[in-house]
Image (cartoon, rainbow, N blue to C red):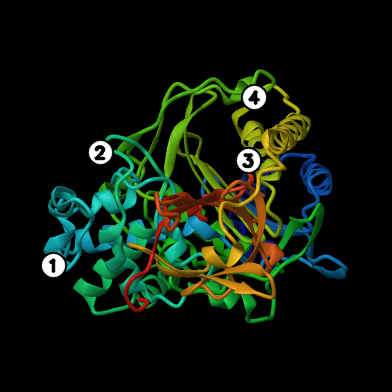
């Protein structure tokens, strides 16, 4: 923040009687000029939206968000870096400027920045194949293995499906980062290489392995020392597990069985490179200042070059442009795409660089409009993306001088529509169910160990007259199978915070033995990282993996 230094009560303000008259006049003139410059600077300093406190409180209440951290940077100044609401429901302790929140996928641009630093040092090339640095790395298709570049790791165009491979780490699994990367070779592509955008997390883990291969440092050590420390983000950390460490940390909340309540945070460090940073309003303001200055640090030195800044925010993977909801006309876009850990599109005639992040109990949004030199970071402790949109667009509109628009009401309507659509989907599924259809086999015939090529083994056991599923490498994925219809069951996970019940359908051979089983989420609201649909389960004929 730029500061106006106070005028001291010294010779300028109280000249000695022996001072010549002309010098006294000059001193008084200098004082007047100093005062006027200071006042002008104070007047020209960017201001926050005048209704900010009332508006943010209204939105948080509307969408049942206990607390939020907000940073606003304009023209190089930190305009706002503060907290709103409380860290945990039922506890009056407020969120402040230093309260930590998981920023989730807003971590991705830090990973991209780390790679950019190594490109600047000549240790990497953006368009060099990954196998140059990780010779053992492989994808399912040998052509993709050979052609996949460092840049490709960051831009969601590898041919993997949406969230493919996330079950290797989500919920927390026994696999380590190297094993997750190794198992990517068994995941069949959903599309051809570089043809379609499909968001993934697992290739950011591969990016971390590249960083380690060329530096000898872990992703955590490199990002902490080479980025966070230099930016001055001294309160932030780089590990999911730190969200449960106590101290000035926002608790995680979500709607479970219709009620917002505190839930357990995500603690696995496998995916730190895709979403592990915990940060605060104060530290995110520092990051926004660096981003908006194209890499210049507070002391005038550079974190990264102007060329790297261009690389980070230049679209690589184009995205289709669709019309917004009829009641949200300001969201109409002319272009959209994904750069390196950042989304890029237009908003009200300006380039908007933005990204969302989501974890159990945390969602965040970091947005900049470079030509207006404004940036907003909003971190919250409840899974409400409508709250993000309502607050961030309201703030951006203030600095763009846009016509008033009631974003809170618009997102409230959109949220109601979405809930109605999901309820209707569930109603249709229930109406289409053949409730009288019985399983083809006795329940114990479905029991056994099933194997997926990329995940590994999943056990179905008959226990006290019912079937129970256990994902061998994911301790929390334990669920009871309730018959739905025919040879389809619903797996109801015992950990209800997962909110990810899934269908499993068994297919039989002509002799009545089980050929295979496939799964998919029951609700369209299920997080895409539960990529059950990518599993192809076959009875295991050898000892489990």
Question: In the figure, 521 relative to 473: above or below?
Answer: above
Q: Which residue is mark 2?
A: 192
Any mark on residue 402, and which? 4
Residue at the spot x=66%, y=54% of the render?
483
Mark 1 residue element = loop
Q: Quadrant of the C terminus?
A: bottom left
The residues bearing labels 4 and 1 have C-alpha atoms spaced at a distance of 52 Å
Residue 360: x and y, percent? 63, 61
Any mark on residue 44, and which? 3
Neighbour tally class for label 3: few under 14, some 14-19, many 20 plus, Cα within 10 Å: few
The residues bearing labels 2 and 4 have C-alpha atoms spaced at a distance of 41 Å
The residues bearing labels 2 and 3 have C-alpha atoms spaced at a distance of 53 Å
Closer to viewer: mark 2 or mark 4: 2
Closer to viewer: mark 4 or mark 1: 1
Any mark on residue 135, and which? 1
| Pointers 2 and 3 in contact (C-beta within 8 Å) | no
Question: In the figure, 100 relative to 110: above or below?
Answer: below
Closer to viewer: mark 4 or mark 3: 4
Q: Nearer the viewer, residue 484 or 352?
A: 484
**Of the image marks 4 and 1, the number of the one nearer the N terminus:** 1
Mark 4 residue element = loop
């Amino acid at each position: 923040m730029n500061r106006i230094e106070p005028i001291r009560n010294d010779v300028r303000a109280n000249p000695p009687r022996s001072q010549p008259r002309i010098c006294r006049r000059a001193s008084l003139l200098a004082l007047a000029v100093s005062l006027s410059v200071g006042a002008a600077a104070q007047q020209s300093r960017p201001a926050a939206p005048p209704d900010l406190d009332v508006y943010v409180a209204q939105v948080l209440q509307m969408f049942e968000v206990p607390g939020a951290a907000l940073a606003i940077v304009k023209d190089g100044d930190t305009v706002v870096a503060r907290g709103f609401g409380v860290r945990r429901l039922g506890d009056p302790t407020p969120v402040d400027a230093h309260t930590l929140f998981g920023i989730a996928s807003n971590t991705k641009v830090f990973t991209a920045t780390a790679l950019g630093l190594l490109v600047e040092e000549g240790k990497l090339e953006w368009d060099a194949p990954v196998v140059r640095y990780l010779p053992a790395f492989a994808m399912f298709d040998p052509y993709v293995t050979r052609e996949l570049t460092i840049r490709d790791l960051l831009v969601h165009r590898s041919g993997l499906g949406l969230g493919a491979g996330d079950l290797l780490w989500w919920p927390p699994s026994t696999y380590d980062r190297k094993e997750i990367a190794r198992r990517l070779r068994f995941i069949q592509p959903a599309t051809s290489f570089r043809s379609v955008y499909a968001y993934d997390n697992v290739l950011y883990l591969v990016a971390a392995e590249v960083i380690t291969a060329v530096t000898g440092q872990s992703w955590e050590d490199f990002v902490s020392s080479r980025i966070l420390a230099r930016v001055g983000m001294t309160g932030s950390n780089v590990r999911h597990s730190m969200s449960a460490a106590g101290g000035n940390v926002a608790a995680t909340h979500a709607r479970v069985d219709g009620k917002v309540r505190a839930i357990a945070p995500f603690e696995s460090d496998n995916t730190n490179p895709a979403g592990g940073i915990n940060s605060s309003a104060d530290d995110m303001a520092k990051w926004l200042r660096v981003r908006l200055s194209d890499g210049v640090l507070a002391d005038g030195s550079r974190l990264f070059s102007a060329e790297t800044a261009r690389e980070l925010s230049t679209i690589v993977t184009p995205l289709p442009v669709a019309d917004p909801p009829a009641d949200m006309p300001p969201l109409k876009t002319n272009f959209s795409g994904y750069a390196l850990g950042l989304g890029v599109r237009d908003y009200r005639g300006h380039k908007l660089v933005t990204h969302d992040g989501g974890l159990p109990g945390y969602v965040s949004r970091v947005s900049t409009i470079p030509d207006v030199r404004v940036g907003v970071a909003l971190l919250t402790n409840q899974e409400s993306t409508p709250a993000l949109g309502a607050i961030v667009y309201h703030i951006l509109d203030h600095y763009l001088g846009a016509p008033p628009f009631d974003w809170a009401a618009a997102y409230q309507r959109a949220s109601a529509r979405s809930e109605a659509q999901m309820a209707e989907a569930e109603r249709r599924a229930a109406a289409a169910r053949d409730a009288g259809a019985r399983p083809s086999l006795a329940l114990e015939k479905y029991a056994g160990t099933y194997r997926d090529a990329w995940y590994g083994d999943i056990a179905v056991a008959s226990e006290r007259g019912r079937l129970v599923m256990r994902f061998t490498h994911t301790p929390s994925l334990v669920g009871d199978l309730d018959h739905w219809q025919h040879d389809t069951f619903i797996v109801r996970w015992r950990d209800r915070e997962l909110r990810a019940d899934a269908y499993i359908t068994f297919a039989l051979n002509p002799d009545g033995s089980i050929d295979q089983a496939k799964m998919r989420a029951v609700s369209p609201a299920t997080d895409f990282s539960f990529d059950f649909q990518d599993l192809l389960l076959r009875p295991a004929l050898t000892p489990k993996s």
